[in-house]
Amino acid sequence: MMNILLTLTLLSAAAWLYLLLMRGRFWTADQRLPQEVTPRRVWPSVVAVIPARNEAALIGRSVASLRRQHYDGSLSIIVIDDHSEDGTAAAAAQAGEGEGHPVRVVEADTRPDGWSGKVWAMAQGVDRAKQLAPQSKYFWFTDADVEHDPEVLAELVQQAEYSMLDMVSTMVMLRCKGFWERLLIPAFVFFFQKLYPFRHVNSPERAAAAAAGGSMLVRRTALNEAGGLGAIAGAWIDDCALGKLLKARGQIWLGLTTGSRSVRCYDLRGVWDMVARTAYTQLDYSPLLLVLTVLAMTCVYLVPVAALVTGLAAAHWLLAGVGAGVWLLMAIAYAPTLKLYGQSAVRGLLLPLSALLYVLMTVDSARRHQGGGGRWKGRTQPRAVE
């Protein structure tokens, strides 16, 4: 038994060495936009599109932050109310009153079969944007719970123009104040970077593609040439699907930011539902991939802890030492993401606990999707086609 556990711990050590050395240095969390904006003679026209469903409590802050953008080009803001039941449209319209960039609030048409709710709302926004600002060069898709600093749009456009990118996307800062947020949110960001190493996404030499839906600046001509949002109509993981669609034709960029923040509060159930909604979709609804994922996560994150505890209890010092070393290695890898969220590096020792909870969320995602799709914001939708 000890030999088996030691072997698994050594496999975990090998996995961490691979992750640290061969996975695009994802753990450094260093892909950021330049914060200094260089003056330009002409700034391109942008239309911001906010798809919103039942976001009355939060959308006012998002709309207000868009209206306060220090952007010298034309910026129009379109809110697509996706048949909300809580007064989202009224809240958005109220936030759009007064001085600032103009805001239009539009009720989405009935969603056709084969479209996911958010992608349909985004497509409605694009259609209205083409009427409102036919010369616009970029669409800026942002979520109804995201608040942006005034310079954010200029930073996104500068990156896109300077590097001739078809998409610039940033993973916004998620709220990280309560117990469950501190335990789970930095880990979510860490796992996302591990799954989609940002350096690989940003390299034209690699096929890796992804995006973060909270803030995506998309070149209009690139989206049109790729077939528009209809090409990802049924996608539940819409941001990554859009990133993959656009990278097949051009270059994209994905990074981290502190200038855009989600103001949504998350408790354990909130994070659980967010992950369970799409985790099994990410695994292509494959029971085999689910089993392999659970085994891999157990080996990489949980076995070192078991090795340390078992080794100490049995006075098996080699097993305990290897387990402690691997546990420390993962805490070191986690430290830059914790720093991004203002957390102590010591909290890296809780990463195995966070991983265990995410494994359980993934298993629950498979349970929820048995026999069909999942449920989100009061809707039951069929399985997505990515």
Image (spheres, rainbow, N blue to C red):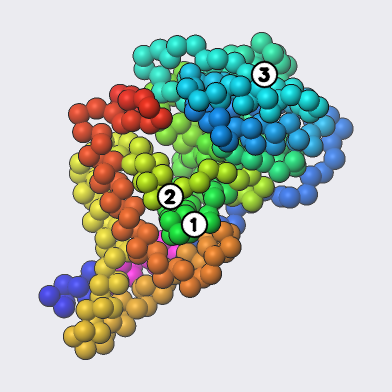
Q: Main secondary structure of the magenta part?
A: helix
The residue to which callout 3 is attached is 104
Residue in the picture at 31% in, 76% down: 323
- Position above or below: 175 against 70: below
The residue to which callout 1 is attached is 178
Q: Is residue 285 visible?
A: yes
Residue in the picture at 60% in, 32% down: 59
Residue 13 belongs to the span the image colors magenta: yes
- Position above or below: 261 against 379: below
Disc on the earlier residue, 2 or 3: 3
Q: Is residue 321 found left or right of 58 in the rendered image?
A: left
- Position above or below: 126 against 13: above
Q: Who is closer to the viewer here, 117 or 295?
A: 117
Q: Quadrant of the C terminus?
A: top left
Q: CA distance from mark 2 to mark 1?
A: 8 Å
Q: Is residue 188 found left or right of 293 in the rendered image?
A: right
* Label 3 environment density (alpha carbons within 10 Å; few <14, some 14–19, many ≥20): some
The residue to which callout 2 is attached is 267
Query: Mark 2 near mark 1, Cβ–Cβ under 8 Å?
Result: yes
Q: Which residues are magenta?
A: 10-20
